């Protein structure tokens, strides 16, 4: 029975203000670790496998989004080296 996964794809954008390398990145859309396995290093193992795979495709960076209220996930991403790059805001009208 699986204990977790990372869903990722290679994204190529055409943003003219970014470098060629910045427009070519791995995008992590979903991360899930079975609750009983959280905090036991599974995320780090899955992330390293994802990084290893992306490097074979000449990808030099990974992007992802996280819900601001998901403090545990945000802490895990920051711990392994992700840095805040953009802030998305929403207003109910």
Image: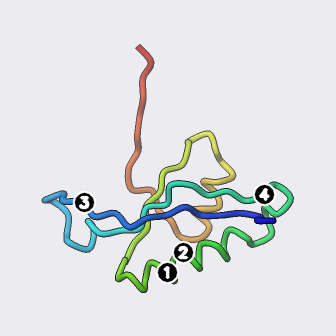
Q: Position of residue 85 (x, y in %)?
A: 39, 56
The residue under label 4 is: 34
Mark 4 and mark 1: Cα distance apart in space: 22 Å
Q: Which one is earlier in the sequence, the residue at label 4 or at label 3?
A: 3
The residue under label 2 is: 50
Do the residues bearing badges 4 and 1 touch, measured as CB atoms within 8 Å?
Answer: no
The residue under label 1 is: 53
The residue under label 3 is: 13
Q: Residue at x 37, y 77 (%)?
A: 59
Q: Say what secondary structure mark 3 lies in.
A: loop
Q: Is residue 36 left or right of residue 41?
A: right
Residue occupying the far right of the picture: 36
Q: Nearer the viewer, residue 68 or 54?
A: 54
Do the residues bearing badges 2 and 1 touch, measured as CB atoms within 8 Å?
Answer: yes
Mark 3 and mark 2: Cα distance apart in space: 20 Å
Q: Which one is earlier in the sequence, the residue at label 4 or at label 1?
A: 4
Q: Say what secondary structure mark 2 lies in.
A: helix
């Amino acid at each position: 029975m699986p204990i977790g996964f990372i869903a990722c794809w290679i994204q190529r954008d055409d943003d003219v203000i970014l470098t060629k390398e910045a427009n070519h990145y791995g995008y992590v859309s979903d991360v899930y670790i079975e609750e009983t396995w959280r905090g036991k290093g599974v995320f780090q193992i899955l992330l390293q496998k994802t990084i290893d795979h992306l490097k074979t495709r000449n990808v030099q960076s990974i992007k992802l989004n996280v819900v601001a209220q998901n403090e545990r996930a945000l802490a895990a991403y920051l711990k392994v080296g992700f840095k805040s790059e953009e802030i998305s805001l929403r207003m109910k009208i």
